[in-house]
Amino acid sequence: MSLVLQGLALGVLTGGLYALLASGLSLYFGVMRVVMVAHPAFLFLAAYLTYTVHTTLGVDPFLALPVIVPLFFGLGVAVQRLLIARLAPDNLAMMSVLLTFGIALTIEGLLGTFYTGSYKSVSMEYATRSLTIGGVHLPYDKIIAFGVAALTLAVLFAVLVKSRFGQALRATIQHREAARLVGVPTERVAGYGFGVGLATAAVGGTVLALITPFFPASHWVWIGKLMAVIVVGGLGSVAGAALAAVVLGMVEGVVLVTVDATWATMMFYVFLFLTLLVRPQGFFGGRLAHRF
Amino acid sequence: MHTVSRVLPLLLAALAIAYPWAVPNYYLVYAGALTVMYAAMSTSWNLLGGFTGYVSLGHSAFFGLGAYGTGLLVVRLGVPWAVALLVSALLVTVFAVGVGIAAVRVRGASFVIVSLALVSMMNLVVQGWRSLTGGSTGLQVPSPFPGLHRGQTHIVFFYLFLALLALALLSWWYVSRSRFGAGLRAIREDEDKAESLGVPTAAYKVAAFALSALFVALAGGLYALWFGSLDPIFVFSILIASFMVLMSLLGGVRHLYGPLLGALIVAPAGEYFLIALGETQIHLTATGLVLVLVVLFMPDGILARFTRRRAGPSIPDESAGQRLQGVTR
């Protein structure tokens, strides 16, 4: 029983990171109807940049954030304005996947060339101990990861709900043409939407570097997991993605401690296919997900 | 134009048959066989991607399953290789029908996600099921032609892959002239309209999915017999699937010879990169960049540049303004 509790607790903590990353994917899908396959590749790019900052300057990995986050925001705007906006609209869904797939391969190749294919990790002295509550051990690195992810998500939600930019972004997601009619510069907003999405990958990458060893090809596993999360949650629904992320994180955590790692990862795909068979639009997606 | 389309296939076939005897060394025979294998696979991919517009990034799952199916039947059950090849391809096709029923329920982006997930799942299964497949250490398959040396085996498999390519091209040609093919094209142009006109879209999509999986599985089986050792990380890699997509797109998905042309460009280029740059990961970057460039600047492929056929839907969606202009003019 305590084993299951342990799995659940770890699952919730990992689920926080999934939620942050999946919310980025939902944003891209919302503003451009684009499935951004390169999102996890950028995640690992951020993790490697964090690694570089940490090893060359010897500073805390979180000090890399003020540099990496604006950099990734700019990259996101550039990817949307220079690449994705150029695609012909009649087959955008398929072509954008191929385009971002090409970007993912490009990044993976560059990471493999510069950092080699071996495992890298960032370990901080404060992150190696763990907190014990009622027989459940919670490693501090996972707690920090969850905290940072939750904080970032909270800021993201606040921006989306409260700020003028958030309103414009949500209007663009809901109905692009109507938003343009009432004066929202949808092109620019879509670009910023991509920037915000990629900024979540930057935060996620720094956190990821702290909690787990990584190598260039590991982003494929993350693509599968995150895609499952956003389909189960309902494509385009940020809240749905966040909820599905935590649920799937818990399932993964429990299966990980009771069965093994292969089945833990497999659960994501099981849920993906079950969702598609039972409820193809996902459990929280509304009108948006209908045709995808 | 008609004489060209009659003479060209014969000329190509003659060149291909003469190829292993015209090149100076066995390495080039090997590279040729690899190229023909990719050409067969991307032509087969195009049975789904070209006709229906459903882009699958998961066809390496069928390649890997075909390879492992053939390998396991030969190694574990001692089945003769030709039987193993056909049985495993049939099993994969049946499997593809099952997957297809789930996968083609969704369109666009979700379909691509499902196809990506398929590869990762199969990779996990094969690596996890260590007692059957040998896990990540791989599977050794004995050579079907123990009497031949390595170079002669390359020649034999060059012709086997060539036969497979011919089969895939013939199927594409036959489908493109059939009612089935017309239905698939209708799905690409506008699935809802096709459905309302009475095209059995779901059945057609599943059939196209399974047919395209069949030839890829055959290629996988031949690959297993040819190479003799299977590595789950390679045969289930996204890279193989992305090669199929890249070759088809580069050549032109709406043309019979599009994927073949793409394969003739991409596969030798890949081999060249491997020699020139060594075993670094930079070849991934090269593949990725080419894919980005093709998608951005040449989504209809090279052949579309040479034929007059216009890209896009045959009945274009016009805006109200365009219609008004057309009427008032």
Image (spheres, coloured by chain):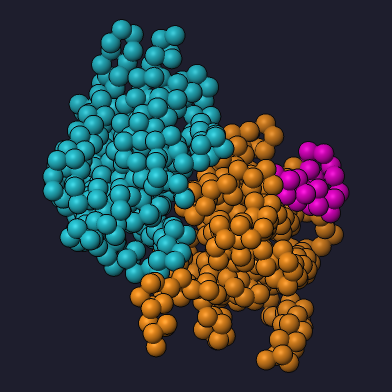
Chain colours: A cyan, B orange
User: Would residue B134 be found to the left or right of residue A165 on screen?
Assistant: right
- At horizontal 57% and vertical 52% (from top left) the residue drawn is B58
- At horizontal 31% and vertical 7% (from top left) the residue drawn is A134
Nearer the observer, B271 or B195: B195
Q: Position of residue B189 (x, y in %)?
A: 55, 66
Q: Main secondary structure of the magenta part?
A: helix
Q: Position of residue A27 (x, y in %)?
A: 30, 48
For the N terminus of chain B, give its image quadrant: bottom right
User: Would residue B210 be found to the left or right of residue B248 on screen?
Assistant: right
For the C terminus of chain B, give its image quadrant: bottom left
Where residue B147 sits, quadrant-wise, is: bottom right
For the question of whether residue A117 can be seen, the reply is no
Specify the segment rendered in magenta.
B73-95
Nearer the observer, B8 or B151: B8
- At horizontal 44% and vertical 58% (from top left) the residue drawn is A93
Q: Position of residue B260 (x, y in %)?
A: 63, 73
Decide whether residue A1 is among the magenta residues.
no
Nearer the observer, B285 or B147: B285
Instruction: Look at the picture and state if B216 lies above or below A135.
Output: below
Where residue A14 sits, quadrant-wise, is: top left
Decide whether residue B85 is among the magenta residues.
yes
Nearer the observer, A279 or B58: A279
- At horizontal 23% and vertical 60% (from top left) the residue drawn is A180
Q: Position of residue B40 (x, y in %)?
A: 68, 66
Where residue B34 sits, quadrant-wise, is: bottom right
The number of numbered discs placed on residues in the rendered structure image is 0
For the question of whether residue B204 can be seen, the reply is yes
